[in-house]
Amino acid sequence: MNTQPKLAYSKEPQVEVATIATSAVLIDLHVSTWTGRKRDKITSAEVNISKQTTSDKAASVIKNLMTDDKDLDSVRAYAQDARLWLQKHTIAWSDGGTRLLPSALIFEVTSELDGRITEYEARVAKFIDAYPIKVSAAAFKLGQLFNRNEFPSADSLARKFGMHYIITPVPTAGDFRVDVQNEVGEYLKAQYSKAADARVAVMMREPWERAYDTLVHAKDRMDTMLAYEPGDADSKRNRPKLFQSMFDNGLEMAKLLDGLNITKDPQLADCAARMRRLFSGHDVKSVRESPELQTAIKKQVEDMLEVFDFGDFKELE
């Protein structure tokens, strides 16, 4: 049992919002897509009548106007992937989707987003260019559900798609400029400071959660590998899987933790450094075949899980 005292992030904010404002910005990614879905009121009414419902809202028929359209599916999937990528490289700031972007990652993130916007627009253009043909194809796919009036024109449809981002400074209590009585202004500043400090405390838990999830995944993999006992009818297909991606993702997470550590938390920096050592220099084939290496990696992970207090959001089972 490791007897070292646990190293933990502070459950209280270690820096004021004013300090955060000098080392990060806020970023909002706005993505709009056309769902291609439409409620069919006529068919919905027919279903409710035929099923003798007592409410015309009992059943609702939603048509997928562009069913099985690979180009539109590609646009939607790419939009979702862009959102997930930004979430991975930033920290949650507000419930509305605003993210905190550390200054150290600004050029990396904005460069990536600029490229993704270009790719998104190219995919949209491909879909719009073929749209007239796609509408004709939809007539065959939808059969009696087809209604040409439900399909917008290509020009109006193109305006339903978009991707852009907005960067703004992190607000501080001093940003309140209200023409009210002094005591009201001071009250608003105090309320904002209190809420913002609490937000910083919650926000800085996110990097620890990501580190925890990465380490637990590695531990689970090693446990699975070590628990496996090949039988007489053993085949490679039955053996537990271990891929290079686990080590690559671990190294990527260590790098990302450095960028997300806007409070300069020495314990988070230490955690990132240990993760870098943990996931570096391994040959996945050797680890896959060596119980000794598996045990060593598991021991390193367990030491980190024991040494660092990852907070009260999870418990190691």
Image: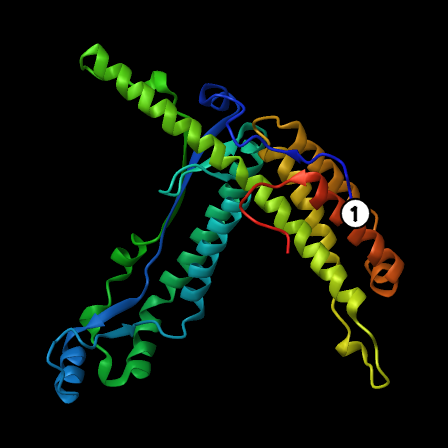
Check the image and tell me how it is coloured.
rainbow
Front position in the image: 5 or 229: 5
Determine the image quadrant of residue 111.
top right
Outermost residue, top side: 182
Determine the image quadrant of residue 240.
bottom right
Q: Position of residue 309 (x, y in %)?
A: 64, 39
Q: Is residue 279 above or below residue 143?
A: above
Measuring 84% from the left and 81% from the top, which residue is drawn there? 231
Measuring 78% from the left and 68% from the top, which residue is drawn there? 227
Q: Is residue 211 above or below residue 78?
A: above
Decide if residue 283 is in sight here: no
Answer with left or right where residue 108 lies relative to residue 166.
right
Outermost residue, bottom side: 50
Decide if residue 183 is in sight here: yes
Front position in the image: 115 or 91: 91
Answer with left or right where residue 269 lies relative to residue 98.
right
Q: Position of residue 29 (x, y in %)?
A: 41, 43
Q: Which residue is mark 1?
A: 300
Front position in the image: 280 or 36: 280
